[in-house]
């Protein structure tokens, strides 16, 4: 028998995993840059935006998508640190 809505669980799990990884990336970048504790929501946002920025930065240097899951986390942390740095510069200007 087919279960109705059985395809929704993997998508939901993927979203949760993305948010958790974003939170971890944001938390690590927050600690590296000494941002002083951004809170749960901002850490997730920072991690997600940082992952996009980090992926872009790594692709510029020719490592786009070829660095595996650990490399993607590192790229996200680098990107999140860049986002924090730019945000600080814009705020102080």
Image (spheres, grey):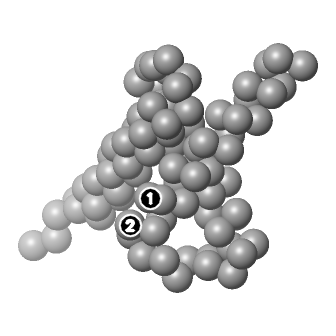
Residue 5 seen from this side: no
Q: Position of residue 37 (x, y in %)?
A: 46, 19
User: Which residue sits at x=74%, y=29%?
Assistant: 87
Q: Quadrant of the C terminus?
A: top right
Residue 7 seen from this side: yes
> In the image, is residue 76 above or below residue 30?
below
User: Which residue sits at x=9%, y=73%?
Assistant: 1
In the picture, measured across the screen, residue 64 lies left or right of residue 70, that is right
Q: Position of residue 28 (x, y in %)?
A: 42, 39
User: Tags 1 and 2 in contact by the CB under 8 Å rule?
Assistant: yes
Q: Residue furthest right?
A: 93
User: Which residue sits at x=49%, y=36%?
Assistant: 32
Q: Which residue is mark 2?
A: 70
Q: Residues within 10 Å of mark 1 (few under 14, many from 20)?
A: many
User: Which residue sits at x=45%, y=31%?
Assistant: 31
In the picture, measured across the screen, residue 71 lies left or right of residue 78, that is left
CA gap between label 1 and label 2 equals: 5 Å
In the picture, measured across the screen, residue 79 lies left or right of residue 93, that is left
Q: Position of residue 2 (x, y in %)?
A: 16, 70
Foreground of the two, 92 or 24: 92
Q: Residues within 10 Å of mark 2 (few under 14, many from 20)?
A: few
Query: Which mark identifies residue 73?
Result: 1
């Amino acid at each position: 028998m087919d279960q109705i809505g059985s395809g929704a669980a993997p998508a939901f799990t993927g979203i949760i995993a993305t948010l958790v990884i974003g939170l971890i990336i944001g938390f690590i970048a927050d600690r590296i840059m000494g941002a002083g504790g951004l809170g749960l929501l901002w850490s997730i946002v920072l991690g997600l935006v940082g992952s996009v920025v980090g992926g872009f930065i790594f692709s510029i240097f020719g490592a786009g998508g070829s660095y595996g899951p650990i490399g993607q986390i590192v790229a996200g942390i680098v990107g999140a640190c860049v986002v924090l740095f730019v945000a600080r510069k814009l705020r102080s200007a």
